[in-house]
Amino acid sequence: MTWHVPEDDLRAYATGDLAPPRLWSADTHLMACERCRLALGAHADPDELAAGWARLDAELDAPRPGPVESLLTRVGVPDHTARLLAATPVLRRSWLTAMALTLLLGAIVGRQTTPLLLLLTAPLLPLVGVAASFGPALDPTYEMAVVAPVHTFRLLMVRTVAVLATTVPVALAASLAVPSFGAVTVGWLLPALALTTLGLALMPWLGTVAAPALVGFGWVAALLADQLLSSHGALFPLTSAGRLAAGGAALAAAVALAAARDRFETGRHLNPSLRFTAGRLS
Amino acid sequence: MTHPTISASGLSLSYRGTRAVDEVSLRLERGVTGLLGPNGAGKTTLLRILATATPPDRGALTLLGHDPSTVRGRLQARRELGYLPQNPGFHSGFTAFEFVDYVAILKEHTDRRARHAEVRRVLDEVGLAEVRGRRIRALSGGMRQRVALAAALVGDPGFLVLDEPTVGLDPEQRMRFRELIAAAGEGRTVLLSTHQTEDVAMLCHRVVVMDKGRVRFDGTPGELVARARGRVWASPERSPEALAGWRTGTGEFRNVGDPPAGARLLEPTLEDGYLLTLDGASEVTV
């Protein structure tokens, strides 16, 4: 064994002041290295050391931080939030769904001669990702989470940011791979922001499936209508007025979302019991 | 009566024309209170209201001194609340430790070491110390229920809401779970929803019977049994006067209802009192 826990880290470990991820390294190393365990004894009294070994024993069954969790912690995300993000299976599912759709989109749009399909689908990817990460229909622990003191809205926002932080760059990279559309390749970003925010803002009233579905279908219908009815060449969302409208809609939806934050705690349509056993309440 | 820790008055909730909870008033104290009722009685909806998962349409509720109709009160109540839903959802790929750790984060246990110590404590408390590293999908139904109970116990809540935790467990698992609920009821207010009158007879100092969204009985198990005194009798054939009757292992019929003159009366059970209460369908508070 060539690496050992530095003296400063051992001192901090003994007093309980060593922070992740160095704490995790020390935990793992101390389990295997007698030399470092003896060195640790010089920094702590026997009672504290015994308590420390009890804690270490508990850590043996504790979740091992994976690469994503370690990375999040290194960039400053609090370790409990990193754990919440890395350990949430529905979040992984939503990432995978969004990534798969993005790759599919990249493959299909590359063959298109107009940006319509890109504009129809790309803005919906973040919305799909967010919708797949939250709600009683998809999250088996939703009911336990709802009655936990962590505010449901905060949980939703944490997951939304996590989904957007991964899906938007990937979708953007995929759309930039289709250079023939020029500025169109980034023209879906504002609509994506507006649609995602609007979908979230409607959830307390319509539910976690119906709200994004309605927004998605509405977007597709409006865009197809624009394509059929408009006499000018450019699709409305790609015009200056369209960008302004998307920005305004995103802002209005954000205000509505902020105003509705407490409804995520009490909204009837977000309640798993009423949602699943309507007409047959038990 | 000691000071109630949970107080509900006139709770009502309707959804799409169904009145699931209808003017329910309750005062719960420390110890285990049983909530009995048939399917569709409104037990789960009432439990969800008391667990702050669903707000009532009407009525007043105080949980451990907090008013859950306000944002601040709801937050405070949730910090002192443990909830085991009827169908606790698991991420089956998690180990028992990982799942309880995940719930502990949701319960604001942010310090990693302190949280892990708490996870270990509750898993020890429910007797799962030896399997804490095992994946949930590899655990038996009884063990999964204990994992869910451990998650509900994180943070040492003052009010524990348990929704039919013994459903689907074999007799040995059920007995083990009863021990855990009895231990959890020491120093806490526990509301236990169940179909099993045996659970109530063995665990509860008080029982509430619900039917069609309303409270039909609220008293001690002894008082519920007393309602059937003089109304259970034996006969060689099923009595036409009986509301319910069945042949027992001795070959005789056990009848519940209004006995004919001269009937040989039997000692009633909690189940007899429960059946008669549901049949009476009038709201009675003892």
Image: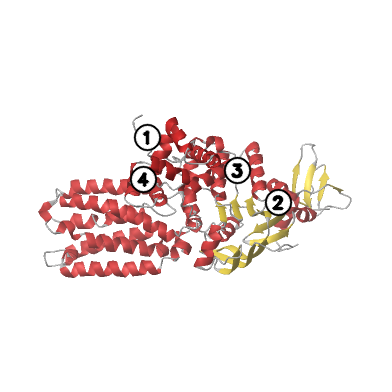
Q: Which residue is mark 1?
A: A4
* Quadrant of the frame with the N terminus of chain B: bottom right
- Place of residue A96 in the rendered image (x, y in percent of width and height, measured from the top left): 31, 45
- Check the picture and name the quadrant holding the C terminus of chain B: bottom right
Amino acid under label 1? His
Confirm whether circles 1 and 4 share one chain: yes
Q: CA distance from mark 4 to mark 3?
A: 29 Å
Mark 1 is surrounded, within 10 Å at the Cα level, by few (under 14), some (14 to 19) or many (20 or more) other residues, namely some
As measured in the structure, the alpha-carbon distance from the residue carrying label 1 to the one carrying label 4 is: 23 Å
Q: Are marks 1 and 3 in contact (CB under 8 Å)?
A: no
Residue B124 on image: x %, y %:
58, 41
Q: Amino acid at mark 4?
A: Glu
* Residue ranking furthest to the top: A1
Left or right: A48 in relation to A187: right
Label 2 crowd bin: few (<14), some (14–19), many (20+), radius 10 Å: many
State yes or no: discs 4 and 3 in contact (Cβ < 8 Å): no
Residue under mark 1: which chain is it in?
Answer: A
Name the residue at 58% across, 39% down: B142
3 vs 2, front mark: 3
Query: Chain ID for label 3?
Result: B
Q: Nearer the viewer, residue A208 or B279?
A: A208
The chain letter for the residue carrying disc 4 is A
- The residue wearing badge 3 is B125
Q: Which residue is mark 4?
A: A69
Q: Is residue B242 visible?
A: yes
* B32 versus B1 height, above or below: above
**Mark 4 residue element:** helix
- Which residue was labeled with disc 2? B204
Instruction: Please check whether the numbered discs 1 and 3 fall on a single chain.
Output: no
**Whole-percent x and y of residue A69?**
36, 45
Residue at x 38%, y 49% (from the top left corner): A82
- Would you place residue B222 above or below residue A257 in this image? above
